[in-house]
Structure formats: C-alpha cells, structure tokens
Image: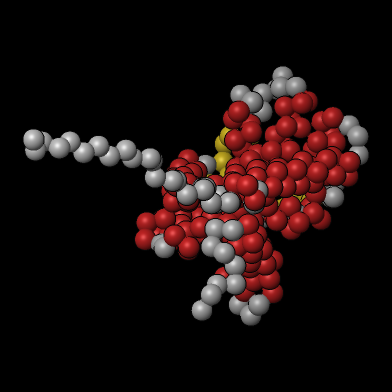
Amino acid sequence: MQPLVTPGSQTEAVGRLVVAGLVVVMLPSLPFGAYLTYPFAILTTWFHEMGHGLTALALGQHFEQLVIYPNGSGVAQSRIDADAPSATLAAIAAGGPLAPSLVGALLILASAFPKLWRAALWLAVAAIIASVAIWVRGIVGTTVLPLVAVFLAAVAWRGSPGLTRFTLQFLGMLGALSMLRDADYLLMEQAVIAGRPMLSDTGQIEAALGLPHWLWAGLIVVMSGLMVGTALKYALAEKRLRPPPPKRPANVLQFRRDTKR
C-alpha cells in the first residue's frame, strides 16, 4: 500500500508535529489522561523553575533550591545580592516563563536533525539528574523527575528512531505550548503558591521596572511565540526537508592496452 505522504517530506514533518501538539493538548482531557500527563506537567514546572534559577546563576546570583508541590506548582529560591540592580531582578523573574518556550524551541530544532535525536534526549536526562542532585528538594521533584529521566533514557537507549523523534517532538511541543497553560498566571499580579500569597513573575517584573504587569505578560508571550515560531519555520523548511539530489556517477574513461604484437 502506497503511503499517504512521502517519507521525509514537509507534509510528514508537519503532520508529526501536529500529532505531538494534539497529544499535549488533548491527552489531559481523556480518561486517566491527567494521571498520564502528570509527570510531564511536573517537567514543565521544572523547565519554568530552572529558568529562574539558572538565570540567577548566569547573572552572578545564588540559586539555592527548587521545590515542586503536588499540585504542579513550584518555587525556585535564589539568594540575590542586596546591591543587585532592578534589571537583574526583572531578568530572573522573566527567566521562568521564557524557559519552557526556549527549551521547546531547541528541542523542535533538534528534532529536525536525526543525528541529534538521541543526543538531545541524553542531554535532557543528564540535566534532570544533575538538577535533582544539586537543587531539587521535596518528595514530588525527587520522585517524579528521576522517573521521567528513566523513561527518556530508555527511549534514547532502546527506542526506535520513530519513537525517539516523536518523544523529542512531544517534549518540544510540551515546552512550546506551556505558555498557554500559564497564560492565567502571567496575567496575575499576585498568586497563591503552597498557601502563601506572593507576586507572580510579571508582578515581580512590574515591581522591579515599573509598567503594568499585563504589559510584561504580553511581551513574554510575544517573545515565546517568536522563539517557537522561528524553530518551527526552520525545522519545517521545505528546502531543508527536500532530499538531496542523487549523486551521479563520475565519468570513467577506460583505456585498453593491447599487449599482443
């Protein structure tokens, strides 16, 4: 039976990413879907909170610990120097909501290169294990995240190429679409986490730099959309997906030497 789409074509690549996106969006609505997606909901929280912590480290501050709660919320605790400028505080706050989209965009890009499929999954496994050993605290993070790492390691080690690519695309779309899940949180000035009211990420940016928090929320959404859109445009470029032209055999000139006289 002839396949509906040409393997390796742009249509196939679009279709696979659409399927991955539908799985991310629709799976929680199915019976027991919330249980199946729970580890990956924790993973998106990990993306978010690691974004805060690693941004703090990159700006010369101190990433103390990361706590994830059973309901999927989390907190990254960083120690900030007293003389740190307001821009540093705002950047750390923005690092959280931008991190899932950045990771998603990078994974979508990696899914376009077969040589990177397994390497990208092994890198994700190493990052999860290292973070659990250094920063993650609490029963949820220290239990669920290693299980996710074991699953990704199994796919990277023994998974078929199709499963490996789909897993990478699923994780990419998970990160890329997490900004939709967090839209309400971005538009809040304050949120209640673990029973304590605190400023949201955009509320912290407002406190540091001024201007309304909803304006910063819009800017974060635009930046996230640009990152993911650029990754999708590159990964699905028709000229890149088009197979290379067949190599023509080199012209061979044959000479015959007659040794008979």
The residue drawn where x is 61% and y is 53% is 172
Task: Place residue 92 in its image quadrant.
Answer: top right
The residue drawn where x is 66% and y is 77% is 30
Furthest toward the right, the residue is 212
Which of 74 and 243 lies nearest the eye of the viewer? 243
- Is residue 12 in view from this perspective? yes
The residue drawn where x is 64% and y is 61% is 11
Image location of residue 227, percent across then percent down: 71, 43
> In the picture, which quadrant includes the C terminus?
top left
Image location of residue 203, percent across then percent down: 82, 41
Task: Place residue 21 in its image quadrant.
Answer: bottom right
- Is residue 67 in view from this perspective? no
Image location of residue 249, percent across then percent down: 39, 45
Furthest toward the top, the residue is 83
Image location of residue 84, percent across then percent down: 71, 22
Furthest toward the front, the residue is 261
> Does residue 28 appear left or right of residue 39 in this picture?
right
Which of 8 and 75 lies nearest the eye of the viewer? 8
> Does residue 124 appear left or right of residue 32 in this picture?
left
